[in-house]
Image: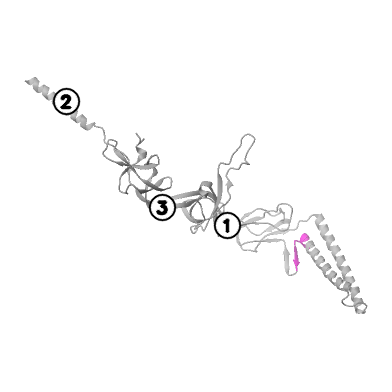
């Protein structure tokens, strides 16, 4: 009898232990990462990389040759139009100076001849030998005026080559180069004592300095041909300057190039390797930029422009990773009590920015969804 009780107690203990083990070691229920859709704004954007610069930039050059004698401005100076920038001193060759002097002497001699000729005709007129409308008499008057003009011109040329200054009527001729615009001196290319080649020379004229209107700053950059096909002027732009990465600056797309600029030119080749152009860059400009007050700007700051192509405001969105695709059909995974723990629900997609996508219909914002990227192969 005692053995029966012991046996029964042992069996009961084994049964209870089995039940406890089954209870505490049963397979866990499905555990998936879930999320819900939210209302948000989706933007499709093109990215342009470039720099900011003044809209008006002028390279200052000289119409006369010479040597830099004085520089009146410094980089960063605000200069009004017609203000003096640089003064040159003449640097003629001995041949040029000799030729100018010879031309002056020759023209003076011709002037003296014209004056004597006119005096002779005037005496004949006074003696009533010839009338006042005599052809040669009238011609001699014109020749005298012409000779005087040539002497004046040669004298001005001699003065400019020897002293760098002269006058032409009421106009003062000088070797001082003045500012062509009102703006900022952003670069000075020369030093005192350097020779200057003029724009009248057959050689390339010397660039003396660069001026710009820093009150009108624009962005210049380039986009790929894939984005250029969707661009049009007037599109909103958000700029980010490298020195101010946290500041978003608004602007308007004002120009899209009609002709492309190759990012990798076929001319950059050698005998060992042929390089092919891999893409075409289209130049773009952004204007009407709303820079924050007090922001320090310098020409050449690198910048990135985000150009908004299309936008959907206050729409239902999901991360693209949460979607499952069956061919061209987009689906979401909705949790349920089935063996696999979810079922598929087709949805209609709208605009995508590459990270999030608009959901037009198929679910609501309160419905829990399974993140398809955490499930693995959902086709299994």
Residue under pointer 3: 312
Residue under pointer 2: 14
| Magenta region | 159-168
Decide if residue 320 is on the left or right side of residue 334. right
**Which residue is painted at 30% across and 39% down in the image?**
342
Decide if residue 1 is on the left or right side of residue 218. left
Q: Position of residue 14 (x, y in %)?
A: 16, 25
Secondary structure of the residue carrying numbered label 1: loop
Secondary structure of the residue carrying numbered label 2: helix
What's the CA distance linking mark 3 and mark 1?
33 Å
What's the CA distance linking mark 2 and mark 3?
65 Å
Q: Quadrant of residue 278?
A: top right
Q: Compare marks 1 and 2 and give the one earlier in the sequence.
A: 2
Circle number at residue 55? 1
Badge 1: residue crowd in 10 Å (few <14, some 14–19, many ≥20):
some
Decide if residue 41 is on the left or right side of residue 181. left
Q: Position of residue 78 (x, y in %)?
A: 59, 61
Please name which of the two marks, 2 or 3, marks the residue nearer to the observer: 3
């Amino acid at each position: 009898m005692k053995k029966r009780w012991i046996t029964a107690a042992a069996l009961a203990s084994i049964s209870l232990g089995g039940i406890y083990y089954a209870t505490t070691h049963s397979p866990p229920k499905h555990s998936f990462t879930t999320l819900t859709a939210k209302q948000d704004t989706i933007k499709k954007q093109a990215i342009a990389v470039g720099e900011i610069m003044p809209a008006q930039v002028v390279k200052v050059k000289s119409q006369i040759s010479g040597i830099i004698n004085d520089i009146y401005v410094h980089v960063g100076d605000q200069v009004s139009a017609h203000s003096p920038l640089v003064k040159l001193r003449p640097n003629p060759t001995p041949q040029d100076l000799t030729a100018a002097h010879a031309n002056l002497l020759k023209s003076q001699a011709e002037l003296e001849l014209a004056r004597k000729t006119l005096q002779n005709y005037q005496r004949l007129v006074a003696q009533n030998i010839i009338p006042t409308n005599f052809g040669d008499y009238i011609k001699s008057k014109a020749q005298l005026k012409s000779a005087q003009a040539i002497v004046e011109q040669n004298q001005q040329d001699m003065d400019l080559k020897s002293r760098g200054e002269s006058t032409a009527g009421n106009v003062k001729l000088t070797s001082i180069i003045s500012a062509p615009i009102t703006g900022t001196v952003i670069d000075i290319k020369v030093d005192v004592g350097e020779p200057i080649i003029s724009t009248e020379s057959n050689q390339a004229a010397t660039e003396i300095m660069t001026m710009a209107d820093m009150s009108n700053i624009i962005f210049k950059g380039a986009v790929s041909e894939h984005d250029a096909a969707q661009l049009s002027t007037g599109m909103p732009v958000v700029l980010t300057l490298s020195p101010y990465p946290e500041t978003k600056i608004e602007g308007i797309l004002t120009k899209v190039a009609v002709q492309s600029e190759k990012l990798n030119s076929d001319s950059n080749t050698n005998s060992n390797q042929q390089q092919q152009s891999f893409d075409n860059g289209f130049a773009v400009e952004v204007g009407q930029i709303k820079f924050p007050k007090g922001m320090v700007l310098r020409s050449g700051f690198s910048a990135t422009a985000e150009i908004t192509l299309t936008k959907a405001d206050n729409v239902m969105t999901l991360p693209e990773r949460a979607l499952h695709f069956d061919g061209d059909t987009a689906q979401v995974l909705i949790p349920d009590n089935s063996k696999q723990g979810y079922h598929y629900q087709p949805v209609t997609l709208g605009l995508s920015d590459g990270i999030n996508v608009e959901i037009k219909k198929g679910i609501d914002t309160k419905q829990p969804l399974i993140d398809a990227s955490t499930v693995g192969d959902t086709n299994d």
